[in-house]
């Protein structure tokens, strides 16, 4: 069967990022400081460059992409979109299924879309050293490469369980000049405290963020860079959805439902927010579905409250769906989704019923990833498998009902460095984790207290 590949010319790389804040009826809740009171954005200058802070708090609808960033984007953007004919046939569904493939970037995932501008803005601000965290390694790889392009040293705190599970992502970071540490470490007060309480602690994104923020705040020559969650990160990722809208226009189609994996929210926001813009302008309503692991279900089982973005409480508090900042996720193989909370913007839109969320178990996601790979040829990252699972489930529901929909998912990255995870799937070593409600309730009891 002929494959439908929908390509845009380089001239169609977006010239602006889209800021969803401009189209929300209610302004985002302000971040809170450690005193539980609204925080002045300037307080974030200890860890972020001022030009990054400006984007973080902006309500401007369109923000220009600097030309040096667009020039580097041309190495892999615009990314291709495909009509999944063979998957449709394998499922026997009346639905049309499309996917956009972000795995063509040098780092193999969508994360480079934000790493490049973050490195650029820090370089312009005179910053030559960055610290960051990474879960599965896609973000650490991307920032290591971006740092190399702009002459910035990068130190990456990698969640220990992923550090051991994914050695080749570690090697990628080192190849691009990144220094990689298994978190928790003995180099920070946060890490030492956690290891003293549990020497075998396998780490979490919350812990790795704490360590990276702590180091950045303690050094005048260093700033911190985050790979998801914050407004400016989701802003940079909207190149995905903006391109996708043009690609749908090329084939005269438009999605009824969009699926994307959701940990912190950058992947989901990147593909979904530009389509929400159409709805906000009076256009067609699209069902936007964030897909998370059932072992780390921040949207579907979390509490909407102010919480820290990290375990130690070094970051500002934001209003988010959270499982509690000291939540310790199981060691599932979708390391990029092992996060206790969700982006404040994604959380607000979920709370206001502008988007939807579902959670899916680990083994079912690998079943979907293998089915997709055998039909379409691309081996997806474990994170991407979550969106594929939810999309396939909807396609099968339509098969039963006879309803024909146009379904679209973001294939956020390839799984070439995740084959150990696939090996464990084929040898029946993977387990499903359904995080106990009692553990979630206990973590939520320890949420920080803020004033109304």
Image: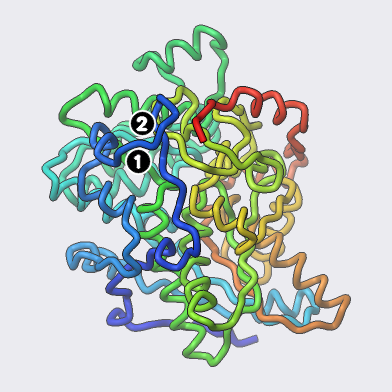
Say which mark, if any, is on residue 173. Answer: 1
Q: Nearer the viewer, residue 1 or 33?
A: 33
Q: Residues within 10 Å of mark 1 (few under 14, many from 20)?
A: many
Residue 414 at x, y percent in the picture: 51, 57
Image side of residue 411 versus residue 122, left or right: right
Quadrant location of residue 408?
Answer: bottom right
Give yes or no for contact between labels 1 and 2 (Cβ–Cβ under 8 Å). Answer: yes
The residue located at (60%, 28%) in the rendering is 327
Query: Is 239 rendered above or below residue 140?
Result: below
Image side of residue 142 versus residue 90, left or right: left
Q: Nearer the viewer, residue 392 or 21?
A: 21
Residue 251 at x, y percent in the picture: 52, 90
Work out whether residue 375 can be spotted.
yes
Quadrant location of residue 375?
Answer: bottom right
Residue 252 at x, y percent in the picture: 54, 92
**Residue at the bottom extreme of this rendering:** 252
**Residue at the top extreme of this rendering:** 196
Q: Residues within 10 Å of mark 2 (few under 14, many from 20)?
A: many
Instruction: Look at mark 2 in the image and give the residue it sits on.
Output: 180
Image side of residue 281 versus residue 18, left or right: right
């Amino acid at each position: 069967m002929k494959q439908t590949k929908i390509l845009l010319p380089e001239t169609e790389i977006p010239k602006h990022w889209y800021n969803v804040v401009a189209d929300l009826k209610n302004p985002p809740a302000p971040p809170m400081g450690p005193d539980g009171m609204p925080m002045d954005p300037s307080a974030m200058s200890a860890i972020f460059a001022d030009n990054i802070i400006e984007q973080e708090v902006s309500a401007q609808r369109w923000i220009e992409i600097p030309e040096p960033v667009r020039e580097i984007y041309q190495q892999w953007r615009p990314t291709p979109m495909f009509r999944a004919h063979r998957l449709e046939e394998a499922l026997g569904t009346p639905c049309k299924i499309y996917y956009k493939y972000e795995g063509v970037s040098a780092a193999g995932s969508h994360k480079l879309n934000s790493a490049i501008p973050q490195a650029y803005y820090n370089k312009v601000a005179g910053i030559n050293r960055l610290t960051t965290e990474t879960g599965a390694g896609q973000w650490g790889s991307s920032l290591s490469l971006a740092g190399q392009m702009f002459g910035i040293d990068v130190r990456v705190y990698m969640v220990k369980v992923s550090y051991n599970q994914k050695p080749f992502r570690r090697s990628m970071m080192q190849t691009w000049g990144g220094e990689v540490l298994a978190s928790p470490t003995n180099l920070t007060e946060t890490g030492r405290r956690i290891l003293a309480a549990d020497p075998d602690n396998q780490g979490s994104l919350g812990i790795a963020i704490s360590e990276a923020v702590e180091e950045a705040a303690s050094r005048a020559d260093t700033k911190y860079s985050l790979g998801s969650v914050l407004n400016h990160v989701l802003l940079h990722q909207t190149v995905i959805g903006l391109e996708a809208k043009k690609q749908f226009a090329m084939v005269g189609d438009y999605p009824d439902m969009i699926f994307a994996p959701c940990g912190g929210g950058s992947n989901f926001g990147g593909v979904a927010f530009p389509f929400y813009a159409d709805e906000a302008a009076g256009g067609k309503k699209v069902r936007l579905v964030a897909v998370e692991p059932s072992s780390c279900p921040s949207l579907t089982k979390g509490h909407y409250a102010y919480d820290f973005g990290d375990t130690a409480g070094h970051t500002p508090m934001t209003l988010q769906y959270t499982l509690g900042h000291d939540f310790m996720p199981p060691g599932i193989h979708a390391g990029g989704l092992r996060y206790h909370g969700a982006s404040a913007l994604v959380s607000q839109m979920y709370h206001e019923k502008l988007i939807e969320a579902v959670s899916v178990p680990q083994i079912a996601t690998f079943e979907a990833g293998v089915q997709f790979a055998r039909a379409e040829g691309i081996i997806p990252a474990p994170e991407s498998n979550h969106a594929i699972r939810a999309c396939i489930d909807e396609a099968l529901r339509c098969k039963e009902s006879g309803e024909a929909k146009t379904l679209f998912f973001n294939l956020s990255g390839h799984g070439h460095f995740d084959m150990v995870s696939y090996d464990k799937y084929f040898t029946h070593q993977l387990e499903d984790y359904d995080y106990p409600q009692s553990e979630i309730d206990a973590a939520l009891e320890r949420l920080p207290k803020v004033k109304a």
